[in-house]
């Protein structure tokens, strides 16, 4: 029987994992520059966390979650996104009692049973940042700046930052009334899912991906015309901060995001109509899942989508040095010494390898070239006896005589 990876999943093979190492390194460096610390949450959570946090009327909860009952009869869900678990951890571990704001970042797999999209699989991976405790629009601008810094460091050009405000629950109530009135006369053109959303959460209709629904909402009322004075001032301040930071943006009233927990600021990064990343403020989510009333904002960035964007734009990621030194050997004594040398050098941080396939010396050197070893040396009876060997630099063919009794010097030479 031939086994294949489940539909919607993808192996990240040794030959390409260096790309992931590179973008993760960049993301960690940028997050650290903003004072963010890493958090790691479980791969699965209680289902009610996502129903209450993400929202029962969202596509994620209604159609896409991987939910099952465990042996204790509890409803468990593989996490479809990273924000709700991070908030749950923040509340459960009383991090709200510490000095605020709390800034954290994470890398996480996310699971969504959906039709595969460009750059998104049923198991994909997200880089996310969450900032808790501040209601200031300067924090909104800072979170957006983290996103833009990632793309800038990667050399991605031609992207567009779209921002919007969906207001607070108070002013959104007025907008919902206007939206329901607008959509009420067009029910026959709405999909069955949007018909159920119309009374419970009409804002979700604006995020529907069905063509007939997208056509209907083109003439819908604009939410920015309904937000209250406080939300309007917050949005204007955000724009001022973005301008001060030199970050270009477009105000796009059509951006609403697909999760219920958002309020006030929301944003998306677009590339020729394709959404690369999105996020926003969620000032009521901490309280919704049992914590104190405390504001927050964050984003999630699809890592597969980022890698696909880099590929499409012809941006090459530098390959890692796979092997620093290949130590070839002749005879039993040479093999023993080779094992001894690479063991000692590995403990000094050198990536090295020797023959484990009983190859001839010529075949060993071919293998060393295949794995792109930076240096090679061959150990035989004479080298072992004299405690000297010739190390060859593969880039230019230069040979350097080294002492087998001074591994420190060999390691320093390779590192230099």
Image: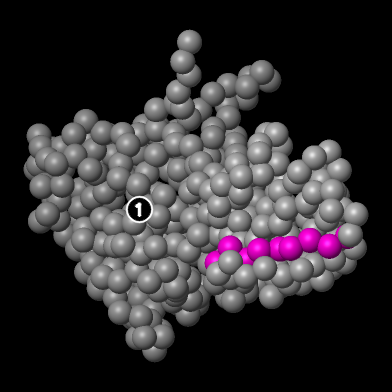
Residue extending furthest top? 1
Residue segment shown in magenta: 387-395
Main secondary structure type of the part rendered in magenta: strand
Q: Is residue 78 above or below residue 75?
A: below
Q: Is residue 413 visible?
A: yes
Residue under the point 58% across and 30% down: 76
Q: Is residue 312 above or below residue 62?
A: below
Q: Position of residue 39 (x, y in %)?
A: 65, 56
Residue under the point 66% across and 18% down: 71
Q: Position of residue 77 (x, y in %)?
A: 54, 32
Residue count near mark 1 (Cα–Cα under 10 Å), binned few <14, some 14–19, many ≥20 = some
Residue extending furthest front? 382
Residue under the point 48% across and 19% down: 3
> In front here: 20 or 371?
371
> In front here: 169 or 337?
337
Give the labeled residue for mark 1: 308
Q: Position of residue 125 (x, y in %)?
A: 48, 47
Residue under the point 48% across and 37% down: 11
- Side of 411 relative to 136 (left or right): right
């Amino acid at each position: 029987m031939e086994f294949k990876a489940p539909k919607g999943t993808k192996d990240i093979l040794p030959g390409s994992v260096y790309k992931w190492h590179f973008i993760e390194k960049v993301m960690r460096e940028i997050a650290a520059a903003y004072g963010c610390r890493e958090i790691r949450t479980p791969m699965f959570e209680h289902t009610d966390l996502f129903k209450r946090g993400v929202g029962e009327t969202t596509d994620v909860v209604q159609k896409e979650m991987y939910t099952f009952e465990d042996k204790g009869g509890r409803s468990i869900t593989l996490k479809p996104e990273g924000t709700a678990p991070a908030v749950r951890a923040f509340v459960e571990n009383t991090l709200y009692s510490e000095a605020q704001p709390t800034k954290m970042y994470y890398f996480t797999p996310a699971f969504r049973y959906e039709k595969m999209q460009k750059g998104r699989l049923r198991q994909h991976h997200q880089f996310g940042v969450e900032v808790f405790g501040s209601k200031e629009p300067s924090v909104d601008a800072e979170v957006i700046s983290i996103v833009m810094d990632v793309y800038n460091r990667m050399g991605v050009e031609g992207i567009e930052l779209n921002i919007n405000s969906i207001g607070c629950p108070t002013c959104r109530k007025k907008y919902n009334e206007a939206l329901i009135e607008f959509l009420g006369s067009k029910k026959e053109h709405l999909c069955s899912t949007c018909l159920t959303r119309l009374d419970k959460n009409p804002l979700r209709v604006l995020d529907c991906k069905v063509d007939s629904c997208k056509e209907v909402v083109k003439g819908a009322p604009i939410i920015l015309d309904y937000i209250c004075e406080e939300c309007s001032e917050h949005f204007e301040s955000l724009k001022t901060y973005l301008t001060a930071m030199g970050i270009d943006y477009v105000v796009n009233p059509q951006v609403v995001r697909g999760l219920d927990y958002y309020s006030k600021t929301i944003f998306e990064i677009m590339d020729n109509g394709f959404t690369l990343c999105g996020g926003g403020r969620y000032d009521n989510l901490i309280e919704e899942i049992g914590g104190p009333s405390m504001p927050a904002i964050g984003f999630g960035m699809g890592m597969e989508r980022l890698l696909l964007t880099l590929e499409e734009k012809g941006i090459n990621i530098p390959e890692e040095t796979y092997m620093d030194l290949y130590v070839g050997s002749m005879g039993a004594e040479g093999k023993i010494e080779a094992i001894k040398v690479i063991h000692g050098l590995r403990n000094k941080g050198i990536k090295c390898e020797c023959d484990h396939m009983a190859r001839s010396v010529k075949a060993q050197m071919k293998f060393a070239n295949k794995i792109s070893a930076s240096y090679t040396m061959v150990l035989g009876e004479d080298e072992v006896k004299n405690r000297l060997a010739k190390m060859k630099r593969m880039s230019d063919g230069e040979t350097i005589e080294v002492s087998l009794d001074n591994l420190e010097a060999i390691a320093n030479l390779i590192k230099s």
